[in-house]
Image: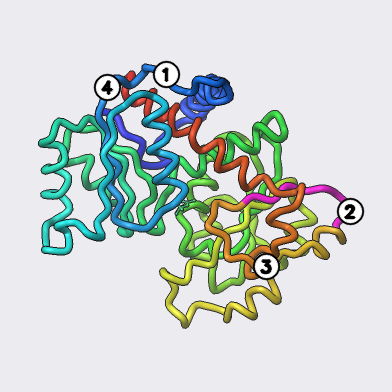
Amino acid sequence: VRHLLGIKDITHEDIQLIFETADNFKDVLNRPIKKVPSLRDITIANVFFENSTRTRLSFELAEKRLSADVINFSSSGSSVKKGETLLDTVNNILAMKVDMIVMRHSSPGTPHFLSRHIKANIVNAGDGTHEHPTQALLDSFSIRERYGEVAGKKVVIIGDILHSRVALSNIFALQKQGAEVMVCGPSTLLPKYIKDLGVKVELDVRKALQWCDVANVLRIQLERMQMKYFPSLREYTLYYGINKKMLDSLNKEITIMHPGPINRGVELSSDVADSQHSIILNQVENGVAIRMAVLYLLAAKG
Ligand code: CP
C-alpha cells in the first residue's frame, strides 16, 4: 500500500509526476464540467483531529471532482471525546470499506504510526510541527506556475519556522527541485537543527527580502507556542511584519506567498496580502489540482 507521509520520502521525479498530473487536472477544473470519473468506486475518509479550513475543504473538493465517495470525520463531536483511541477510530472507519485515509493530527508522526498498522492508503494532511506535504507541493506548483520553473529560484521562508510543518516540507520540496532556500525569523523561532538542513539563515527580514525572488510568509502559531520562546506579537510585527513600505523600498519585484490562515497585521499587512505581489489565493486554487493528482496517483498505484 502506498502513502504520502512526507516530502522527505519522495523524489524529484515523484514531484514532477505529481505536477504533470496536476497540470491536467487544472485544465479539467477550468472547464464548465469539472468532474472526472477517475476515482469512482473509491471511498475516502478525511480524518481531522485538528482544525482546518483550506486543507480539509480542498481535499473534499478534490475527492468529489474525482468522483470518489467521501466521508468526513472531525475529532470534536466524535467518540474520541469518550476515550476511543486513534487506532480504534481509524479501524472502525476502515470497517465501513474505506479505501484511503486523509489525516491531520497535532502529534508529529501520527500518519507514519498508522501506516504501520492499517492497510489503506494514507495521505498526511499535516502532522503537528512535522510535515504538510500537500501544502509544500501546492506551494512549489504555484512558484512553477509564476516563474516557469522552481530550479534556481531564491525562496525565503519567513517567521515561525520552529512550529511550522509547512516550513519543513517546503525546505525538502524546494531543495529537491534545485531552488535556493533561506529561512528568516527571530532566533527564538528557528529550530536548533536548521543549519543541518542546508538552508541559509538570515535574522534581518529586510536583507532576506532583498535576496529573494519569493517570500513564503508563515503564521505565528500561537496555539503551539510556549511563551518563553516568543517575542510579543507587537515586537514580532515591529521587526518581522511585512508591509507595503518595505516592499516598495526593494529595488525589485518579489512574490509573496502564505499558506493561510493569515494573522492580518501581524506577519503581513493587508495591503501586501491583497496586493499584486501576492499569489495567496492562487495557492489555494492550486491546492485542489495538487490534491486530485496525489489521490489519483496513489489510487492508481494501489
Ligand atoms: N494551509 C493550511 O493548512 O490551512 P488550514 O489549516 O486551514 O487547512
Query: 193 or 13: which is nearer to us?
Result: 13
Image quadrant where residue 32 sits:
top right
Amino acid of disc 1: Val
Please give the label number shown on residue 203: 3
Label 1 neighbour load within 10 Å: few <14, some 14-19, many 20+? some
Q: What separation in Å lies between label 3 and label 4 (alpha carbons)?
A: 45 Å
Amino acid of disc 4: Gly
Q: What separation in Å lies between label 1 and label 4 (alpha carbons)?
A: 19 Å
Q: Residue at x 61, y 55 (%)?
A: 157
Please give the label number shown on residue 134: none
Label 3 neighbour load within 10 Å: few <14, some 14-19, many 20+? some
Q: Earlier in the sequence, mark 3 or mark 4?
A: 3
Please give the label number shown on residue 251: 2
Image quadrant where residue 302 sits:
top left
The mark lying in front, picked from 2 and 3, is 2
Residue 16 visible in this rendered orientation of the protein:
no
Query: Which element type, helix, strand or loop, lies under badge 2?
Result: loop
Name the residue tied to disc 4: 302
**Residues in magenta?**
250-257
Queried whether the magenta region covers residue 225, the answer comes back as no
Whether the residue carrying mark 3 lies under 8 Å from ligand 1 is answered with no
Amino acid of disc 2: Asn
Query: Which element type, helix, strand or loop, lies under badge 4?
Result: loop
In the rendered image, residue 158, in percent from the top left (x then y), is placed at: 62, 59
- Position of 252 with respect to 196 (left or right) is right
Q: What separation in Å lies between label 2 and label 3 (alpha carbons)?
A: 20 Å
Q: Earlier in the sequence, mark 3 or mark 1?
A: 1
Q: Earlier in the sequence, mark 2 or mark 4?
A: 2
Q: Quadrant of the N terminus?
A: top left
